[in-house]
Image (cartoon, coloured by chain):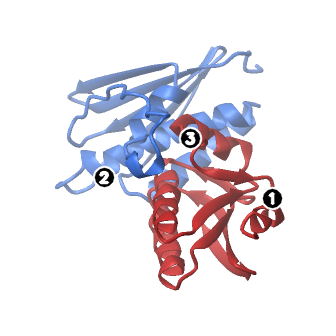
Chain colours: A red, B blue
């Protein structure tokens, strides 16, 4: 699993590449907590290249979303692959999280 | 006719990716669709994570054995471990009305196993604990 980060205006895009499981998700949690601690609360998870997640990855994203919202921000998810989206759907969290078809749309959602 | 495959690794978190790759390769060779393959990987991953983090708690990690059996109408995934036995149960569905603040973000492992598999069986024997996950196929595996 690889993580890349890029600031886009008021938002920060975090691209997650590869697989999230019990082995790799603590790395994501640490990374997202670091972003939040630095004051980047408007986060976008670019999941275009996330091929797989188990409940461990889901939990990492949900906990970061909770934390970001407490700081007045959010974690918005972009370009989620169908198999990964199904994991969110099974969990029942699709009504609570915000999904966007691509990164530019997610970036635009933080404007205005 | 059915065909069977086996892989054995140490019960540690690094094994999860190895087992997922093993399932991927087996599914690809048999032309099994990506959604079905994902379900098999997810159920296996959740079950093995439980064994690695809880089943072998306080013990030296032993072996984890993954068996795949492909039959025309179903795939059977069997996970054998030698740690503490844990009888799985089907948990309640998450409360769809609760907000993020009120929800527990954990405990989805067992829920995902029961949601993605058609049948879950568990046996504790002298040869280890065996979790048997069955996924029906809605088509026939090519011969």
Mark 2 or 1: the one toward you: 1
A42 vs B31, left or right, is left
- Say which of B9 and A7 sits in front: A7
Give me the C-alpha separation between circle 1 and circle 3.
Answer: 26 Å
Whether residues under marks 2 and 3 lie with C-beta atoms below 8 angstroms apart, the answer is: no
Locate residue B33, reporting x and y percent.
74, 32
What residue lies at 76% left-to-right and 19% top-to-bottom?
Answer: B143
Q: Secondary structure at mark 3?
A: helix
Locate residue A8, reporting x and y percent.
75, 79
- Say which of A15 and B29 sits in front: A15
Q: Quadrant of residue B46?
A: top left
Give me the C-alpha separation between circle 2 and circle 3.
Answer: 18 Å
Q: Which numbered tag is attached to residue A102? A: 1
Give me the C-alpha separation between circle 2 and circle 1.
Answer: 36 Å
Residue B43 lies, with reference to residue A11, above or below; the image says above
A49 vs B55, left or right, is right
What is the chain identity of the residue bearing mark 1? A
Q: Which residue is mark 3?
A: B41
Q: Secondary structure at mark 1?
A: loop
**Quarter of the N terminus of chain A within the rendering:** bottom right
What residue lies at 81% left-to-right and 58% top-to-bottom?
Answer: A102
What residue lies at 73% left-to-right and 15% top-to-bottom?
Answer: B140
What is the chain identity of the residue bearing mark 2? B
Whether residues under marks 1 and 3 lie with C-beta atoms below 8 angstroms apart, the answer is: no
B141 vs B133, left or right, is right
What residue lies at 20% left-to-right and 40% top-to-bottom?
Answer: B84
Q: Which residue is mark 2?
A: B53
Q: Secondary structure at mark 2?
A: helix
Q: Can the viewer see residue B128? A: yes
Q: Can the viewer see residue B6? A: no
């Amino acid at each position: 699993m690889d993580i890349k980060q890029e600031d886009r205006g008021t938002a920060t895009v975090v691209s997650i590449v590869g697989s999230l499981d019990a082995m790799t998700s603590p790395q994501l949690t640490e990374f997202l907590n670091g972003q939040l601690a630095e004051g980047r609360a408007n986060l976008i998870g670019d999941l275009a290249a996330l091929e797989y997640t188990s409940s461990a990855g889901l939990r990492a994203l949900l906990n970061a979303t909770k934390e970001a919202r407490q700081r007045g921000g959010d974690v918005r998810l972009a370009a989620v692959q169908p198999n990964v989206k199904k994991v969110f759907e099974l969990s029942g969290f699709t009504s609570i999280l915000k999904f966007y078809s691509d990164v530019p749309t997610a970036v635009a959602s933080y404007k205005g | 006719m059915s065909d069977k495959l086996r892989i054995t690794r140490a019960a540690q978190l690094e094994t999860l990716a190895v087992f997922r790759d093993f399932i991927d390769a087996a599914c690809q060779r048999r032309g099994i669709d990506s959604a079905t393959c994902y379900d098999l990987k997810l159920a296996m991953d959740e079950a093995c994570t439980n064994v690695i983090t809880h089943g072998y708690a306080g013990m030296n990690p032993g072996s984890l054995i993954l068996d795949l059996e492909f039959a025309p109408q179903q795939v059977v995934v069997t996970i054998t471990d030698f740690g503490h036995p844990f009888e799985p149960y089907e948990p309640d569905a998450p409360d769809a009305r609760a907000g993020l603040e009120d929800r527990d973000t954990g405990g989805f492992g067992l829920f995902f196993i029961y949601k993605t598999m058609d049948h879950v069986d568990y046996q504790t024997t002298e040869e280890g604990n065996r979790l048997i996950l069955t996924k029906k196929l809605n088509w026939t595996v090519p011969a």
